[in-house]
Image (cartoon, rainbow, N blue to C red):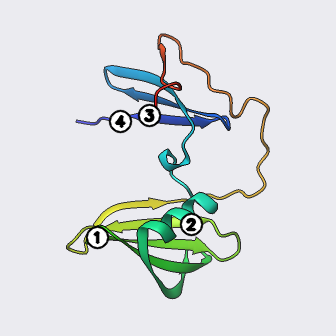
Amino acid sequence: MVTGEELVTTIDGTHLYSFINQPGHKEAVKKKLNYDDVLQIAGPHLFRDLVTNNKLTLLPEEMRDNHATKVIKAQPNDGSWETIHYFDKATGIRLEMTEMDAKGQTALQIKLSEVNTNPTIIEDQFKFVVPGGVTLEDQSNSP
């Protein structure tokens, strides 16, 4: 048996739109933008979260997919698990994150396989379009 899902997130600078397409279920939601709800790959929100919520340890640099990286181990202030973060030395982008459970086993791994630091952005790139047959649930006024 094979299953899959489509997850699309669009951020327009004010709102976060998400579309979930699973077998037998589709939904679209509009929320007030909160950067804590967005997987960060670089920038002040990511580093603020890492510094505020973790004990950080700088590990030896490593090569990852032909990128020289700075490696940081983060152990949450309130947990026994840890994450290892690999930041590209040239761009500061987090290329890989591996989350380990309390037994040291990989529980989650996220890798960026292609990074383009100078993309062509089309005008409608950050405009969310509700897919046909789906009603947008507006939660942007919820607390």
Q: Position of residue 50 (x, y in %)?
A: 49, 67
Q: Earlier in the sequence, mark 1 or mark 2?
A: 2
Q: Tag 3, which secondary structure?
A: strand
Amino acid type assigned to the residue bearing label 2 in the image: Phe
Amino acid type assigned to the residue bearing label 3 in the image: Glu
Q: Tag 2, which secondary structure?
A: helix
Query: In screen coordinates, is 33 left or right of 142?
Result: right
Q: Tag 4, which secondary structure?
A: loop
Front-most of residues 114 and 95:
95
Q: Is residue 23 at all visible to an observer of this figure?
A: yes
**Residue drawn 25% across the image and 75% down it:** 104
Amino acid type assigned to the residue bearing label 4 in the image: Gly
User: Spatial distance from mark 4 to mark 1, Cα to Cα?
Assistant: 28 Å
Query: In screen coordinates, is 119 left or right of 134?
Result: right
Q: Which mark is residue 94?
A: none
- Dot 3 crowding, Cα within 10 Å, few <14, some 14–19, many 20+: few
Q: Which residue is mark 3?
A: 6
Q: Which residue is mark 1?
A: 81
- Dot 4 crowding, Cα within 10 Å, few <14, some 14–19, many 20+: few
Q: Nearer the viewer, mark 2 or mark 3?
A: 2
User: Spatial distance from mark 4 to mark 2, Cα to Cα?
Assistant: 32 Å
Front-most of residues 99 and 52:
52
Q: Earlier in the sequence, mark 4 or mark 1?
A: 4
Q: Quadrant of the N terminus?
A: top left
Q: Earlier in the sequence, mark 2 or mark 3?
A: 3
